[in-house]
Image: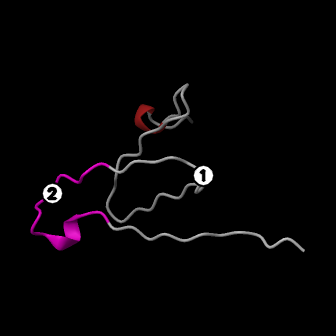
C-alpha cells in the first residue's frame, strides 16, 4: 500500500507531512527542512508546535 499523496516523495526529493495530534516526525539531520506556522489560537500554549532536537552518532574505533 503506498502512502497518501501528501506524504509521497516527489521527483525533487521533497515531501509534505501533515501534522497530527500527538505525533512525531524523525528524519536525518542532513535533510533540509521547513516548518510552517501553526493555524491555532495564539493564546493557547498547548496548541502550538514543540520541538525536541538530538544527535545520534557512532564513534570510530
Mark 1 vs 2, N-terminal side: 1
Chain part drawn in magenta: 36-49
Residue named by callout 2: 40
Q: Position of residue 8 (x, y in %)?
A: 50, 34
The structure residue drawn at horizontal position 56% and vertical position 33%, both measured from the top left corner, is 13
Q: Is residue 12 magenta?
A: no
Secondary structure, mark 2, is loop
Classified by dominant secondary structure, the portion drawn in magenta counts as loop
**Crowdedness of circle 1 by 10 Å Cα count: few (<14), some, many (20+)?**
few
The structure residue drawn at horizontal position 40% and vertical position 62%, both measured from the top left corner, is 23
Residue 40 vs 47, above or below: the answer is above
The structure residue drawn at horizontal position 24% and vertical position 51%, both measured from the top left corner, is 37
Quarter where residue 38 is shown: bottom left
Q: Nearer the viewer, residue 3 or 19?
A: 19
Q: Nearer the viewer, mark 1 or mark 2?
A: 1
Q: Nearer the viewer, residue 2 or 57?
A: 57
Q: Is residue 1 left or right of residue 39?
A: right
Q: Position of residue 31 (x, y in %)?
A: 56, 48
**Residue 20 — which label?**
none
**Residue 30 — which label?**
1
Q: Are marks 1 and 2 in contact (CB under 8 Å)?
A: no
Q: Is residue 29 left or right of residue 58?
A: left
The structure residue drawn at horizontal position 60% and vertical position 55%, both measured from the top left corner, is 28
In this view, the residue farthest toward the right is 61
Q: Nearer the viewer, residue 4 or 59?
A: 59
Q: Position of residue 35 (x, y in %)?
A: 35, 51
For the residues marked 1 and 2, what is the alpha-carbon distance in whole angstroms?
30 Å
Residue 15 vs 51, above or below: the answer is above
Amino acid at each position: 500500500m503506498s502512502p497518501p499523496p501528501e506524504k509521497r516523495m516527489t521527483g525533487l526529493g521533497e515531501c509534505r507531512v501533515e501534522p497530527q495530534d500527538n505525533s512525531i516526525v524523525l528524519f536525518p539531520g542532513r535533510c533540509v527542512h521547513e516548518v510552517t506556522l501553526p493555524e491555532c489560537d495564539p493564546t493557547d500554549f498547548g496548541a502550538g508546535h514543540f520541538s525536541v532536537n538530538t544527535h545520534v552518532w557512532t564513534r570510530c574505533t
